[in-house]
Amino acid sequence: VRAVAMSPLPVVCGVGHETDVTLCDLAADLRAPTPTAAAELAAPAREGLLQQLANLERSLNLRLDHRLQTIAQRLDRLALRLARPSDVLARQRRLLDLLAQRAAAAPGRRIELQRQRLAHLAPRPARALAETLRRQGARLDALQARLQALDPQHVLARGYAWLDDGDGGAITSVHALLPGHEVRAVLADGSVDLRVLGVLPSPQG
């Protein structure tokens, strides 16, 4: 009786003598008329457990579906923010066209700026896009080398000069000059003011 009373677990007592009341019946948490009835009281009905499991499964499925829908919506929003590879390549082509148009004004600086802007487009996960960017970078490097070779400062450094009319206007033909005209020769390290003594057109001109 003392063990029943001190048990930390609930105790169902079912001795089986309905007409008698034992001390264990009084000490137990619950009394049943027979052992079978005690077993039924101690163990929940199978149908009830199955229903609880079904309810739990339904709840978990609903929560999982909701979570998946939330993740899918986030992925859709992220996908809308990411440029497609074809869009990136189209922007590159436009940048290259713009670079070709403006390169004459400041070849080295403008090409470097455009190359840096294209480099910022590189962090994309697709290998094909990375390879395309690498090829575009190589083309830019080759174009930069060609333009640097044609840079007027490089040409002047090799001993050449160009003429202007003193106001910055380029003189490209002897037919624009007459004896006595004052012109300016621009060299690599400065300029020289000159006066035309004579004009000798080339036979081909």
Image (cartoon, rainbow, N blue to C red):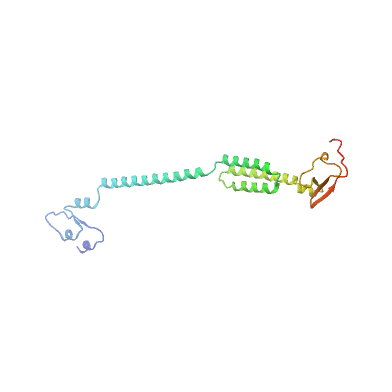
At 28% from the left and 45% from the top, the residue drawn is 51
Q: Position of residue 100 (x, y in %)?
A: 68, 41
In the picture, measured across the screen, residue 146 lies left or right of residue 194, that is: left
Query: Is the residue 201 above or below the residue 109 in the image?
Result: above
The quarter of the picture where residue 137 lies is top right
Q: Position of residue 175 (x, y in %)?
A: 83, 39
The quarter of the picture where residue 177 lies is top right
Name the residue nearer the viewer: 152 or 158: 152
Q: Position of residue 36 (x, y in %)?
A: 20, 50
Name the residue nearer the viewer: 173 or 76: 173
Q: Position of residue 45 (x, y in %)?
A: 24, 48
In the picture, measured across the screen, residue 4 lies left or right of residue 68, that is: left
In the picture, measured across the screen, residue 111 lies left or right of residue 59, that is: right
At 34% from the left and 46% from the top, the residue drawn is 59
Name the residue nearer the viewer: 83 or 130: 83
Screen quadrant of the C terminus: top right
At 29% from the left and 47% from the top, the residue drawn is 52
In the picture, measured across the screen, residue 84 lies left or right of residue 35, that is: right
Q: Which residue appears farthest toward the front when viewing the image?
A: 180
Screen quadrant of the N terminus: bottom left
